[in-house]
Amino acid sequence: MITVNHLCKSYRIAKRNPGFTAACKALFHREYEIIHALKDVSFTISDGEMVGYIGPNGAGKSSTIKILSGILTPEGGTVSVDGRVPWKNRIEHVRQIGVVFGQRSQLWWDVPVMDSFELLKDIYSVPTPQYKKSLEELTALLHLEELLRSPVRQLSLGQRMKCEIAASLLHNPRILFLDEPTIGLDAVSKLAVREFILQLNKEKGTTVILTTHDMQDIEALASRIILIGKGQILMDGNIDSIKKGSAAIDETVAELYHSYEVV
Amino acid sequence: MKKYFSFFRLRFTLGLQYRVAALAGIATQFAWGFMEVMIFAAFYRGDKNAFPMSLSATCSYIWLGQGFLAFFATWMMDNEIFDSILKGNIAYELCRPIDIYNIWFSKSVAVRLSRAMLRCFPILLVAAFLPDPYGLAKPESCLHFFLFILTLALGLLVTAAFCMLIYILTFYTISPQGLRILFTSAADFFSGGVIPLPFFPEPVQKIMELLPFAAMQNVSLRIYSGSMETDEMKKAILLQLFWLFILIFTGKILCRQAEKKITVQGG
């Protein structure tokens, strides 16, 4: 169970005009702008839910995920994930969650995928029988047999992403955060990833929170949608409530963004 | 503890993969070692009684310094750690049940150890067969050799703990360049990397020996050739332990502070 109440987070960003004069001026006087990435965000997610967290670029999606996974400390508000405050006891908290950042890599570049997995086993202190079981399941579901012995640098993006997802699940977390897991993937890989996530949710009851710009991801996966824009929750409902007849999902969402004036 | 060791093991084995880099390193260190030996030999020809260490001890110091360069060179820092901070991959490290300081510390030690393992044996072996007094002499005694190994390990840990400070300060400065240049040139000079500390004028040397830099290569390399008295050795080892504690303690506090106000760069 995840409860988020009145969450606030802001960043200080140095700004200056382009050009030499402005750069010289900035040497003596620097202008900062405070960007409120999150202003008063509240929601509750129950166990076993699959939630799509959507919004335009810069809406605060990644900031929320990073706070929920204990990476960032917010300025205000409370968060409780299964009774834990993520940023207060980070190490205790992250033992129970899995995170995939679609734009980053957690696998060691120069060694076979298997080496990274074995390291994660030790990092999470997963007992050997349980590790073997998870590995077998993940290998079968994601079709990894061929990939595990290759160095990560020689995998394609789609192959790597499958391994990244497997890596985040070796310790059998109860909650999985996916930050743009299908970014840059081809149709086949996308479908494979989606199918896998559905199955994971259905069979193990893993809570999944997913951010993405791919509305088909949302359509295929999320039973519930939280729409965030300019740091505020704009809408929280199920996918059918925003769908209008036969309009394609991308158009519907674009219209939604416009109607809330967030883009 | 096991997880940090596994991390150490993986980084260590990864380091052993880079054979060509090691060969290039060995060649450079030979060239550098010979150059230093020749310079000192020329000085000693002028008046050998004017120097605080015998030529043989100085040459041993040079060859050991070259062999274990990867242990003590503060400028050999891990760009992966800088990248992790600067490009935001630290996000992944933070969502693991690991302590950031400990994991980076074991990583730094592993990198240095694997580099030195690949490089030190050929260099020391060849140096040992060079004609006296230009090569690597035998250790002064068994006890000296034992203390050499002990202080070598302590020196490695002090160097790694010192570099940790630079990594962590990058959280605050965003660019590591300035700090790196400042700290590594200071460290090279004050640790006896350019010339051994006994060659400095007495008053300066007294101060230098108290600094954390003197707890890096200075102690073990001098103990090996017996150019330290028993009292001096005791004091030097205690200072190594003292600085190791202070550096790790400061690093951990800074790291905790930095983690609280971390920004993940690059979204």
Image (cartoon, coloured by chain):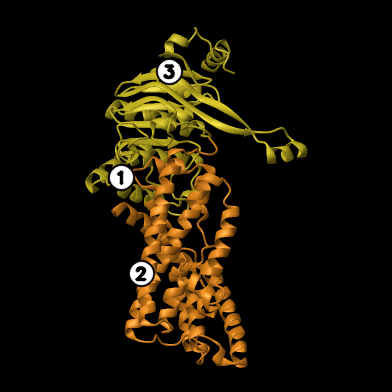
Chain colours: A yellow, B orange
Amino acid found under the numbered disc labelled 3:
Ile
Task: Give the label, 2 or 1, closer to the camera.
Answer: 2
Q: Position of residue A106 (x, y in %)?
A: 44, 44
Residues at marks 2 and 1, common chain? no
- At numbered mark 2, what does the secondary structure look like: helix, strand or loop? helix
Q: Which residue carries the number 1 mark?
A: A124
Is residue B98 positioned above or below A45 on the image? Answer: below
The residue furthest front is B203
Q: Which residue carries the number 3 mark?
A: A225
Is residue B140 positioned above or below B66 on the image? Answer: below
Amino acid found under the numbered disc labelled 2:
Leu
Q: Which residue is drawn at 26% across and 42% down?
A: A133
Pointers 1 and 3 in contact (C-beta within 8 Å): no
Q: Label 2 marks which chain's residue?
A: B
Report which quarter residue B174 is drawn in.
top right
Q: Label 3 marks which chain's residue?
A: A
Instruction: Quarter of the image for the C terminus of chain A: give it.
Output: top right
Report which quarter residue A221 is drawn in.
top left
Q: Position of residue A39 (x, y in %)?
A: 48, 21
Is residue A23 positioned above or below B141 on the image? Answer: above
Dot label at residue B238 = 2
Q: Which residue is drawn at 53% across and 25% down?
A: A36
Instruction: Quarter of the image for the N terminus of chain A: give it.
Output: top left
Task: Give the label, 3 or 2, closer to the camera.
Answer: 2
Dot label at residue A23 = none
